[in-house]
Amino acid sequence: MIANCQKTQVTQKPNILLICVDDLRPELKSFGADYISSPNIDHLATEGIKFQKHFANAPSCGPSRYTLLTGQYGTAGNNALFLRANKIKEDTKIINQSMPEWFKTHGYTTVSVGKVSHHPGGRGGKDWNDSTKIEMPNAWDRHLMPVAEWEHPRGIMHGLANGEIRLKSSDMNVFQTVKGTDNIYPDGAITEEALKQLKELTTINKNPFFLAVGIIKPHLPFGAPKSYFDQYEGVQLPSIEHPGKPEGRSTWHGSSEFKQYNRWGKNANIDTVFADEVRRHYAACVSYADAQAGKILAELKRTGADANTIVVLWGDHGWHLGEHAIWGKHSLFEESLHSPLIIHYPGMKHKGANTDAIVETLDIFPTLCDLTGIEIPKYAQGVSLKGILVDPEIPGHTAFAYKKGASTIRTSTHRMILHQDGFVELYDHTTAEKETKNVAVKYPKLVEELKNALNTRLN
């Protein structure tokens, strides 16, 4: 008698594609910005779940990406990951593994392309290309930064069309439109490398992959090919909500990052025509970034790997477009912290659903562990969002964030900002005033409760 032998099928763990978009507020059609052209990200949104109330843990690139990539709160400066790298050099035993290192330990091939950590390509030095100064030690099998005609990663970070590098920021225009292909701006080179890596990872590589791609736009300066700017010709922009500078003390700042560029002597807070131009150029950059994301997603589908790949699209923080008379990030207002998050995984049931659950960037690391069946490390300070992905009606949790000298907690109804010297801002999101009227004096008990929650979590 011949035994009926069947081969045991081994299901490979799902791949991970993480697309990070710099300075992207929820200015996408799928997140309610009807005037924006973002067809590729919107299509991904129909395949995944949109977290309409996702908040970054910091309103700046470096510390926000620290929380994403380590699963822990960190310091408030853009050098947060480099400080961590220095500690690893001092004592390798006291540092927890980063998210990509954790997945590499569990059999994944890890690759980053573009701006995933704070420095595109993940290196330090004068031009951000010193291979002896690694921003995330032990994290990536390959960490790549094609520079094309922009010479080096520092040049590409703030590059404009056809190899223009920021030498003196006041000589570089705050926005620009140039006729040409997608490759006349830096993200074209990043996307081409990402496509090359996807092809290799899906044909040669035998392990599951963790591919992170960092798109630079819509980061300042606002430059995109003319074809994207032309999409907004004649389009009526929505009015700026709460455009006035807040009265009294607040997390307001003077938009120094924006003002360092050449603005032709114009002030967007009083010149409505100039403000409209700035917003249209930001929108053009969003559409340009959307096109790059679309190419990456199309290549994933072409390879067939999409059937076993978790896709996460994440904005590293928000950006003010005139709200509270701010043009930039770096505040603890809603606009600086609110950013898009879309998660798709194979076999999910609620494709295209929205959730209003409050979540934070810190939750992405444990979520990816949960979705891949890998142990969630004990040091991860976020929580898995798998339950919300299974049932989008499940409530979320409070969200925390910080900058130098202040921290904040966001609940479903309020935002409290606690300054280092004890000054408190409390805003009621159930009212029309939202973050324009400080009601801290009116609700001392609530302030005390939120202070305790904030101090417990961040300390």
Image (cartoon, rainbow, N blue to C red):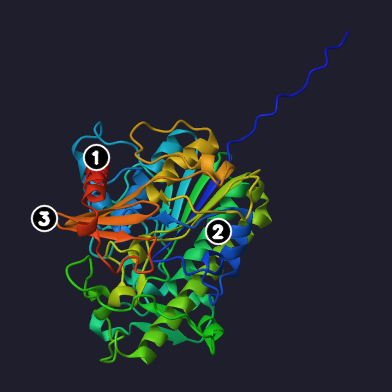
The foreground one among 58 and 192 is 58
Mark 3, other Cα within 10 Å: few <14 / some 14–19 / many ≥20: few
Counting from the top left corner in percent of width and height, residue 26 is at 46, 65
Mark 2, other Cα within 10 Å: few <14 / some 14–19 / many ≥20: few
Relative to 413, is 23 above or below?
A: below
Q: Count numbered badges in the picture.
A: 3
Relative to 309, is 419 above or below?
A: below
Q: For marks 3 and 2, give the CA distance.
A: 51 Å
Rendered-image quadrant of the C terminus: top left
Does residue 368 appear to the left or right of 417 in the view shown?
A: right
Mark 3 and mark 1 lie on one chain; the one further toward the N terminus is 3
Q: For marks 2 and 1, give the CA distance.
A: 45 Å
Mark 3 in CB contact with mark 1 (< 8 angstroms) = no
Give the structural element (helix, strand or loop) at label 1: helix
Rendered-image quadrant of the N terminus: top right
Counting from the top left corner in percent of width and height, residue 378 is at 36, 31
Q: Amino acid at mark 2?
A: Lys
Relative to 306, is 253 above or below?
A: below
Counting from the top left corner in percent of width and height, residue 347 is at 66, 43
Q: Is residue 85 visible?
A: no
Counting from the top left corner in percent of width and height, residue 72 is at 31, 43
The residue labelled by disc 2 is: 196
The foreground one among 363 and 82 is 363
Query: Could you say which disc has been placed on residue 421 in the image?
Result: 3
The residue labelled by disc 1 is: 456
Does residue 284 appear to the left or right of 40 in the view shown?
A: left
Mark 3 and mark 2 lie on one chain; the one further toward the N terminus is 2
